Image: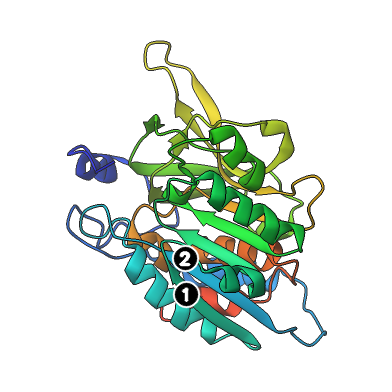
Amino acid sequence: MTRGLFLAATVLACAVSTVSRTAIGAEQDQAPVRKRAEIEAVIKAAPKDAAEARPLKILLVAGPKDHGKGEHDYPRWQKDWTELLKKANAVTVDTAWKWPTSEQLKTADLMVCYFKSPWTAEQIADVKALQERGAGVVTIHWAIGADQGWEEHSKVVGLSYRAAGYRHGWVDLKIEAKEHPIVRGFPSTLRFLDEPYWPFIGDASKVKTIASSEELLKKDDGRKTPVPVFWTYEPEGRKGRAFVSIFGHYMWTFDDPLFRLLLLRGIAWSANDWPYRFDELATDGVKLAD
């Protein structure tokens, strides 16, 4: 799924609200610039935890880059987020290429996947075993797309994606689960420049939709339908949790502090930890507008 030529026109046409339009173009690799006060307000709304941070082992799984410049750069993400998460207290970061070893799967408290994988029956069994012992899993963007066994794949991450509908451009995100700790302090609507997917396979009643976007699923009827963009999942009979982010097509998204907050809180929540444990990393090395 590569960007269409319409992206530049879409960017120029859209109102941006609190997001700056600077440095967003076909060949530029920079996140939209958020206002400092906007990010500080979200972080300050989170309660403080007086407990000492427990040791947490996070496994980052990546694979070969499969898109153009500034898109789906799984190796770069793995390198950057290894360094980012290492800055957190009591965190150990391990990495794997394409799929972890059995030993890595046995010792990780959380596995974060950003890559394109077939999601074989063996891989799904590995994730189920990981969740059964209470560890969590996070999937980012195309890591939600299986090549086979979509129903079984949905049973470990809530919903699965069989490559079908998608678009690139500005997305107006609506917070659906306002009471969920992952979006504590967030405004009710947000705007991102990324790529939503649809439709999904699985039982939507089993997931908690954190945020959605309205998409034109059938171009001929002109009606828009809410599509999940971020969700959580707690599989029956397993202690482990899952968090899914459909966003992550463009690498600039990972430098958007609001996206970082969503992902960092999803990581902590999936690990059955304090959801705001990594909030301070959301602005690490990120340019903010005063």
The reply to whether residue 184 is in sight is no
Residue that badge 2 annotates: 61
The reply to whether residue 262 is in sight is yes
Q: Count neighbours of disc 1 (C-alpha within 10 A) and say few if under 14, some if 14 to 19, many if 20 or more.
A: some
- Is residue 230 left or right of 287 when viewed as pictured? right
CB atoms at circles 2 and 1 under 8 Å apart?
yes
Query: Tag 1's secondary structure?
Result: strand
Where is 181 relative to 122, above or below?
A: below
Q: Residue 5: percent from the left, percent from the top?
A: 17, 39
Spatial CA distance of label 2 from label 1 is 6 Å
Q: Which one is earlier in the sequence, the residue at label 2 or at label 1?
A: 2
Query: Tag 2's secondary structure?
Result: strand
Three-letter code for the amino acid on which mark 1 is drawn: Thr
Residue that badge 1 annotates: 95
Between 14 and 72, the residue placed more toward the observer is: 72
Tally of marks? 2
- Is residue 241 left or right of 77 when viewed as pictured? right
Between 18 and 97, the residue placed more toward the observer is: 97
Q: Residue 249: percent from the left, percent from the top?
A: 36, 52
